[in-house]
Image: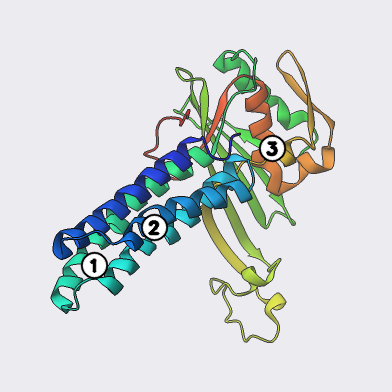
Amino acid sequence: MNRVLNPPVIVAALLLLLAGAASLGWLWLRDGRAAPTAIIILFLPIALLLAGMLAGGSSRTQIGISAWAITMFAAMIPAYYVLQSGPANWFVQWRFMVGYGLFFVVVLPVFMLWLASWTAWVPPAPGAMPIAEHRLKRRVQSLADAGLKLRIERPTGQPDRMLVTRDFRDDKRTVGVRLTFVSGGHCVLVREVSLIRGDKPMNASEAQMRSGPRQRDGTHPDADLIYDASLTVTPPSEAIRRQMTLRITDDRVEIASGQDIAAAPGNLAHLLTELVHQSGWGWQGVFADWQGRCNRN
């Protein structure tokens, strides 16, 4: 994917240009002149954005994360310049900060939600014709017999959904992926859940959790039991998907190679992504139940 000519970078550049023009325009109207430094400040955020994108990776995940981080930082540059070069009157500065703060509170969160949706989208495989919905469901169902210890359910009264779960660590942990099939758009909306039921921490981050029945004293964190339930979205990773090869015969799916990779609980979403991808459907990770359509940009 082109690192520069893609929707996140174009939208981020327009937002930075808008923020810079509004900030410096406010300053110029008060001073009645345009300083050469202000022109540099206007285009500096966009230059930082382009430089960061050229230095980063080319996957959707890398582009999305880089675009968001650089935009948040670069958007502060014109505001800082105005505060340093503008009127010393605190009331005037305060009014400017309130107006610019609305940009961060209203505009950037909308951009973040759209960018997250774009990052979590995996388009169908090039040249793959989308199969019928019932056939894709049969392919997902066949994974239960692929030796991956998966449990696949179809919720009662919700014919457009399937739930794929995997228990591990003596059934004390569960990862689950809820699939919602949008047949009209040939895409699958995906919601992930992670459950921990009285298991020991697996890393330092989990050792700091306080939701267990006993308080952690800081000396033996591995002795604590933790409980947690969280909704997650796994960033797509083509590198992980390439490590597993699926053999699809009609509507039966087998793991031709990369069995260990496919069986890892943390790769459940990647396994399902590859299956949906090869079946000619799109994969859309969602962050809230109200998200009802796929991002095809």
**Amino acid carrying mark 2 in the image:** Ile
Q: CA distance from mark 1 to mark 3?
A: 42 Å
Q: Earlier in the sequence, mark 2 or mark 3?
A: 2
Disc 1 is placed on an element classified as helix
Front tag of 2 and 3: 2
Residue at the outermost right position: 257
Asked whether residue 232 is in view, the answer is no
Residue 55 position (above or below residue 96): above
Q: Nearer the viewer, residue 48 or 285?
A: 48
Q: Position of residue 83 (x, y in %)?
A: 28, 71
Front tag of 1 and 3: 1
Q: Is residue 127 left or right of residue 183?
A: right
Q: Quadrant of residue 213?
A: bottom right
Q: Position of residue 64 (x, y in %)?
A: 52, 46
Q: Tags 1 and 2 in contact by the CB under 8 Å rule?
A: no
Q: Earlier in the sequence, mark 1 or mark 2?
A: 2
Front tag of 1 and 2: 2
Q: Nearer the viewer, residue 123 or 137?
A: 123
Please give the residue where the numbered disc 3 appears in the rendered image. 238
Q: Which mark is residue 97?
A: 1
Q: Which mark is residue 40?
A: 2
Residue at 58% across, 40% down: 3
Q: Quadrant of residue 219?
A: bottom right
Q: Position of residue 122 (x, y in %)?
A: 58, 32
